[in-house]
Image (cartoon, rainbow, N blue to C red):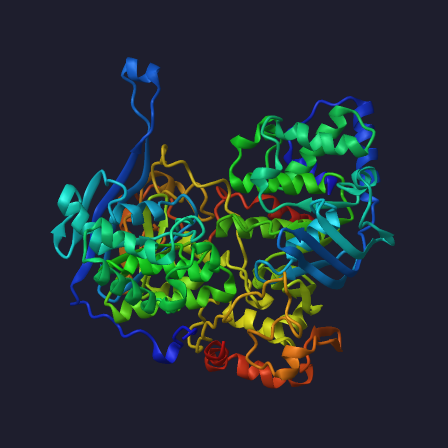
Amino acid sequence: MNTLMTSDHRRPTISDHTSPVVVARDLKTHFQMSAGIFAALTGGAVPTAKALDGVDLRIREKEIVGLVGESGCGKSTLGMSLVRMYQPTHGQILYRGEDVTKVEGRRLKDYRRHAQIIFQDPYSSLNPRLTIGQIIEEPLIIHGLGNAAERRQKVVRALDLVRIPAKDNIDRYPSDLSGGQRQRIAIARALVLEPKFIVADEPVSMLDVSIQASVLELLDELSRELGLAVLYISHDIATVGYICDHVAVMYLGRIVEEGKAEDILSEPLHPYTQRLMAAIPRMDLADAPQRHELKGDVPSPMAIPPGCRFASRCPYATELCHAVEPDLAACLGTRKVRCHIHDDRAAAEYPHLRRPKQDQVTEMADLGVLAEVAGSRHG
Amino acid sequence: MASLALDRSSPRRMSEANRHELAELNHRLEAKPAARLKVENLSVTYATERGPFYAVDDVSFEVRPATNLGLVGESGCGKSTVVKALMGLQPDTAWVGGQALLDGDNILGLGERALQQIRWSRISLITQSAMNSLDPVYCIGDQIIEAIRAHERVSKSVAWARAEDMFALVGLPASRLFEFPHQFSGGMRQRTVIAMALALNAGMLLADEPTTALDPIMQSQIMSRIRGIHEQMRRSMILVTHDIAVVAETCEDTVVMYAGQVAEKGPTNDVLKLPLHPYTMGLQNAFPRLPVRGEPRQPLISIPGVVPNLHTPPKGCRFAGRCPFATDKCHSEPPPLVQVGHQSATCHYVDRAAEFRVLAAQPNTWRKTKAEA
């Protein structure tokens, strides 16, 4: 039970005809910051944080889509927007073909029954004053489902699904459980409403490595057994490879690369994905790739630069990158990449601007102190 | 090193006397040798309402001069407690036994005055949460020069110049020394804490999960920097982490801790390639790896069960409750530390390690223990 599938029995491929459970179309979630009284009186522009800025995504039944990127790139905003915890400001969310972007009241509550979210920290997401049984029962009460006996039955079934013996645990408190067990309770709470779509926002990053595998495997099995569509959000790109069919990499509110998990993990094309992959420490020193230090931090979502969003930190950036934003272009079959290195169109349109090339570090890149250290050691 | 640092900082207007003083300070600090730390039979017991809690029990290891030692294990294994005890930061209710010889001097159980003298100058700490280790009401530069001037009799401007050098070393612009902690991002704060720990070129650095709260790119940049600094300055370091790959890339030696005791120790290459202790094998199999095209992927296997409650540590081997190979002997007799080559492990069946390694890589092996438990 505590293993993930190996390469010989991997997930059955999901056919393209399977109808999608959740679709996001050009989804944007912008947050208005408080402008202050002076700006309000003078009619100045209200600063806006473009946390999520035009994302297309599709998740089908039994499919786990991985969403990776560093902190602040908008991963969680996308997850929270999809379950309508944030109100998207633009674009559409379709749940089984029905537009749920702006539904309110009764219909919003209905949608939330079908779309659940699991949070990162099982230590703060469970009410310490309620028993396990009460925690899992609460959503049923909120949605007015069943009488006490039926609810009890559903709670027991949910605990069964997450492999926690109901008999011994239903009357215990979260403080009696370990981190891994708590995360299972959080999953049970999401499952009790029998949702069709689950957002798992960093479900294992607070857990010890020794038990991460069992929670990941649980998600994988549940998605197949119950036909769930799962959005698995994580900054740990290595765990994504074990359970996801499809991976999307986000940077500053947009998807910069997406495709089949094994393609992206074994051969990342976008310089940002490449850097993200290189960042993973390797067990074998011989496998450790060369790591370019990215200069600076992620630009502020309140002042998004023109051109490619990654250009300010990309070691290969040229004039073209700073001026023109690349499209998310299809490349090598099912893969999509947002980079001028892999898309000719912008280069053809702006022939006077120099185009970036694969592995060619430009003088605009700053390799940081480490390069100097290396230089001084050799020199 | 000083020359490298100077290249990046803005030209400074310094008097001839100050420049001379700075050169002297740098020279004095660079002359400090890397430290040797010998921890012998370290035990830390906390007095709690529910009785004594044996957080660390009879731990011994040695950090050779100018090497990195990785301290790994799950949460609750006593890694951070070891570091706290070495820095004299344990709470008053804790009882500390054994000794820790820093270049021959025992640093356990020192008084406040003696501790002040060795902290920062001989042993310094890079903390886990950089957020909490900086004072929000002082500018960063003032906090660094305070540490420098507590140990070296130099003027403020010279100490500031040293702080600028340290900032350059960790890749931060000198102008930001005037800023306050809240103006820094998480990665910058972590680098500030590293700069502070290096300011007096202490012979021994303790890094307690220096990258845990950071995202992967910042994590890799901080670790690259720590490695670069280590290569240049040749300090000794203990790196506490739960990430065995970070240890594989950074440390010459590794100590694997389990439930307050040493499960296995030795050169990193041996310990992580050919582990002797079933716990180390379990950690390895649970660690997510990147796929290699064309090669079958190792399954990810979790270790069933949880770390035992250290109020009442198990009688025999502490890992026996989760170990797929445990026998009656394991449950009743604490295993001895057995040496094999440079490596050693606390296991009754070290001689069967090769056989265990094969079995441990199979998911079914670990499944069985769960059913029994």
Foreground: B300 or B222?
A: B300
In the rendered view, tell whether residue A104 sits above or below residue A199.
above
Judge left or right: residue A136 versus residue A96. Answer: right
Foreground: A302 or A290?
A: A302
In the rendered view, tell whether residue A350 sits above or below residue B365.
above
Q: Which residue lies furthest to the left in this view?
A: A98
Residue A368 in sight: yes
In the rendered view, tell whether residue B134 sits above or below residue A96.
above
User: Picture coordinates of residue A118 (x, y %)?
Assistant: 34, 54
In the rendered view, tell whether residue A245 sits above or below residue B368.
above
Quarter of the image for residue B335 reads bottom right
Quarter of the image for residue A245 reads bottom left
User: Picture coordinates of residue A263 (x, y %)?
Assistant: 36, 66
Residue at coordinates 50% horizontally, 78% vertically from top-left? Answer: B369
Foreground: A136 or B5?
A: A136
Residue A267 in sight: no
Judge left or right: residue B98 versus residue B323. Answer: right
Q: Which residue lies furthest to the right in this view?
A: B104
Residue at coordinates 71% horizontally, 53% vertically from top-left? Answer: B237
Q: How many marks?
A: 0
User: Picture coordinates of residue B37 (x, y %)?
Assistant: 79, 56
Residue at coordinates 73% horizontally, 47% vertically from top-left? Answer: B87
User: Picture coordinates of residue B77 (x, y %)?
Assistant: 62, 61
Quarter of the image for residue B324 reads bottom right
Residue at coordinates 43% horizontally, 56% vertically from top-left? Answer: A173
